[in-house]
Image: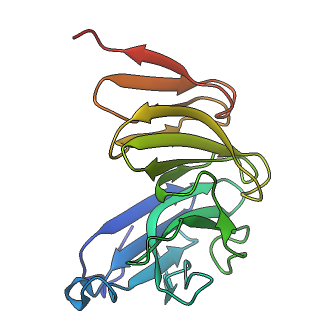
């Protein structure tokens, strides 16, 4: 795999699914809070060739810049992008592609309102995300590619450290430094293991 020669920036997110590789890079970190655009790179042949596009998050409904915070990909060409609205204190959202990132669907709002931290996807229809609301991190799941969401777990946290799936049903989440959450039903229910103090 050879990364694009033009990749220079701050804040890189990379995900791989089969022969598909997706890369998001903030390439203008000196632009300030209102102008830190990301560039989206994708390869469908294990990195032999790359195509480039603007940040799939685009803009929020009020026209404010929205930026990629996280990526997830599944077999079958699904790409899920978590989006944050810069400097407007507006809720985050996700956009979903079903054609290996060639195009993305509309913004899908996440409830509860907050900052979208991490996204993961056991399948193209079943999405899981972390949402940060003040000092609480929520785990939310969608069974219809982001059209609607249900909160499945919450914990006291100011950030989420990890969210991922090893197959279509088994996944793990770390919302704070004491507990690991495990799901065996694609994110519908989570079982905590809390480390002793």
What residue is rendered at 46% in x and 71% in y?
A: 68
Q: Which of these two is toward me, 33 or 126?
A: 33
Image x and y of residue 26, in percent: 32, 79
What residue is rendered at 55% in x and 85% in y?
A: 59
Please state, as top left, top right, bottom left or bottom right, where the N terminus lies in the image.
Answer: bottom left
What residue is rendered at 31% in x and 88% in y?
A: 6
Image x and y of residue 107, in percent: 67, 73
What residue is rendered at 70% in x and 49% in y?
A: 149
In the rendered structure, the answer to whether residue 48 lies left or right of residue 120 reads left
Q: Does 144 sit above or below residue 45?
A: above
Total marks placed: 0
Q: Is residue 126 visible?
A: yes
Please state, as top left, top right, bottom left or bottom right, where the C terminus lies in the image.
Answer: top left
Q: Does 191 sit above or below residue 83?
A: above
Colouring chosen for the image of the structure: rainbow
* Image quadrant where residue 100 sits: bottom right
Q: Which of these two is toward me, 42 or 85?
A: 85
* Image quadrant where residue 23 sits: bottom left
Image x and y of residue 129, in percent: 55, 49
Image x and y of residue 83, in percent: 51, 68
Q: Does 110 sit above or below residue 84?
A: above
Q: Is residue 122 visible?
A: no
- Residue found at the very far top of the displayed protein: 196
* Image quadrant where residue 150 sits: top right
């Amino acid at each position: 795999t050879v990364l694009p020669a033009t990749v220079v920036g701050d804040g890189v997110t990379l995900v791989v699914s089969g022969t598909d590789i997706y890369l998001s890079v903030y390439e203008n970190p000196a632009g300030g809070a209102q102008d830190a655009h990301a560039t989206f790179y994708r390869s469908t042949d294990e990195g032999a060739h790359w195509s480039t596009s603007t940040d799939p998050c685009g803009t929020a409904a009020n026209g404010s810049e929205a930026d990629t915070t996280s990526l997830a990909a599944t077999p079958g060409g699904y790409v899920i992008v978590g989006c944050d609205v810069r400097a407007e204190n507006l809720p985050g959202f996700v956009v979903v592609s079903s054609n290996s990132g060639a195009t993305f669907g509309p913004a899908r709002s996440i409830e509860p309102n907050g900052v979208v931290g991490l996204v993961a996807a056991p399948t193209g229809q079943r999405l899981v995300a972390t949402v940060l609301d003040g000092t609480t991190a929520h785990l939310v799941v969608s069974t219809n590619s982001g059209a609607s969401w249900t909160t499945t777990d919450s914990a006291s946290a100011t950030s989420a450290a990890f969210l991922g799936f090893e197959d279509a049903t088994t996944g793990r989440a770390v919302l704070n430094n004491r507990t690991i959450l495990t799901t065996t039903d694609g994110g519908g229910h989570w079982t905590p293991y809390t480390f002793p103090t």
